[in-house]
Amino acid sequence: MLSNIWKRQAPQMVGIDIGSHEVKAILLSKTADGYKILSHAAIPLKKGAVNDHEIRDTEAVSEAMKQVKRSLPKTTKFAAVAVSGSAVMTKVIYMDSSLSEEEMEAQIEIEADNLIPYSLDEVNIDFETLSANKTDPSKVDVLLSACRSENIDSRIDALEETNLEVKVVDVEGYALGRAFEMISAQLPKGADNKVVALVDIGANITTFSVVENGETTFVREQAFGGEQFTQSILSFYGMTYEQAEQAKLAGDLPRNYMFEVLSPFQTQLLQQIKRTLQIYCTSSGKDRVDHIVLCGGTAKLEGMTNLMINELGVNTVIGDPFKGCLHADDAVKQQLQPDIGKYMLACGLALRSYAEWRT
């Protein structure tokens, strides 16, 4: 069912990123020079509770959400979440700019029926008008998004058990692109008018979002992430999964691990990023991106930024919203500083509280 198009002031929403390893949440307030963290949480999930971005164990996710809810102000009522993976489809189509919103909505349903390989009864559809088409000014580019209803419903059910009402279900790639606002000041002057690739390296999925002149123009996912690194440690050194995870986080690994495990994993990750950037350049007609921002827990692996700079010749940084326009009380900042990059997606979702609102 298509969303209505009436616009009003968005409610304040906590951004909730339901990942494979943990649920991350962040609540923001708007300030004169950016945004301030009001509340945050990162709650570990039982292994297998979320797989390929699908909730497989609703009870485990609901239990984690109850812990998240306890960390939030009691007045927090609304949330924004995101979907991704094989159940999500996005496509930019173009339509006649003279169409009214009601006519566009009717036309979108026809387009969706032709584009989506599922019955429309099984999917949720939404769309957003982007900008005038570059090759035909009489047309406008329209972003069509569709997702299997069961993926959306599982997230809504998990949150409703904690009395949080889901007001927005976003697509992860676009939520990541929105978070560029948080870190744009971290990049050299003029980056707002450049092509910036945000790369979120999660446990099982690496999400790419390319932002051009402040607008997300390309999103893609690769089934590769930090889990492969953990599995390499596990098999190479004969550890259990829990031991490998702990050793990875604590840096308590054999002296030769950099050559035996880290370097091969980084080479694989670099190839994934290279391949996706080539796809972007081919589809956009661009020669290259101007900046790369790495985020997610795996982005902090030793030497990642230097490897990207040396191999790709592109300025690369680890995303740090605190070097951009994100603020927090000293104690909160000190606590989050080492891992703030993993909250990028949650920040992008929380920013929906301060964007144009469509109910």
Image (tube, helix red, strand yellow):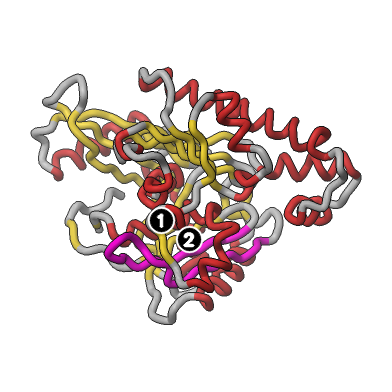
- Amino acid type of the residue that numbered disc 2 sits on in the rendered structure: Ile
Task: Count residues near mark 2 (Cα–Cα under 10 Å), then give few for <14, some for 14-19, many for 20+.
Answer: many
Q: Position of residue 43 (x, y in %)?
A: 61, 66
Residue that extends furthest to the left in the rendered view of this protein: 98
Magenta run includes residue 25 = yes
Residue that extends furthest to the bottom in the rendered view of this protein: 74
Task: Report whether 16 appears left or right of 28.
Answer: right
| Residue at 78% from the left image edge and 42% from the top image edge | 231
Residue 13 appears in which quarter of the rendering? bottom left
Query: In the rendered image, which residue does mark 1 sit on?
Result: 349
Query: In this picture, is 340 found above or below 160?
Result: above
Q: Position of residue 329 (x, y in %)?
A: 46, 72
Q: Quadrant of the C terminus?
A: bottom left
Task: Report whether 137 appears left or right of 21.
Answer: left
Mark 1 and mark 2 lie on one chain; the one further toward the N terminus is 2
Q: Position of residue 127 (x, y in %)?
A: 28, 42
Q: How far, Cα to Cα, is label 1 from label 2? A: 7 Å
Evaluate whether residue 94 shows in this view.
Answer: yes
| Residue at 34% from the left image edge and 45% from the top image edge | 125
- Residue 28's label in the rendered image is none
Magenta run includes residue 86 = no
- Check disc 1 and report its element: helix, strand or loop: helix
Evaluate whether residue 122 shows in this view.
Answer: no
Marks 1 and 2: CB-CB under 8 Å? yes
Specify the segment rendered in magenta: 22-45
Task: Count residues near mark 1 (Cα–Cα under 10 Å), then give few for <14, some for 14-19, many for 20+.
Answer: many
Q: Position of residue 53 (x, y in %)?
A: 56, 48
Residue that extends furthest to the right in the rendered view of this protein: 238
Query: In the rendered image, which residue does mark 2 sit on?
Result: 16
- Check disc 2 and report its element: helix, strand or loop: strand
| Residue at 78% from the left image edge and 56% from the top image edge | 246
In this orientation, which residue lies closer to the viewer: 3 or 38?
Answer: 38
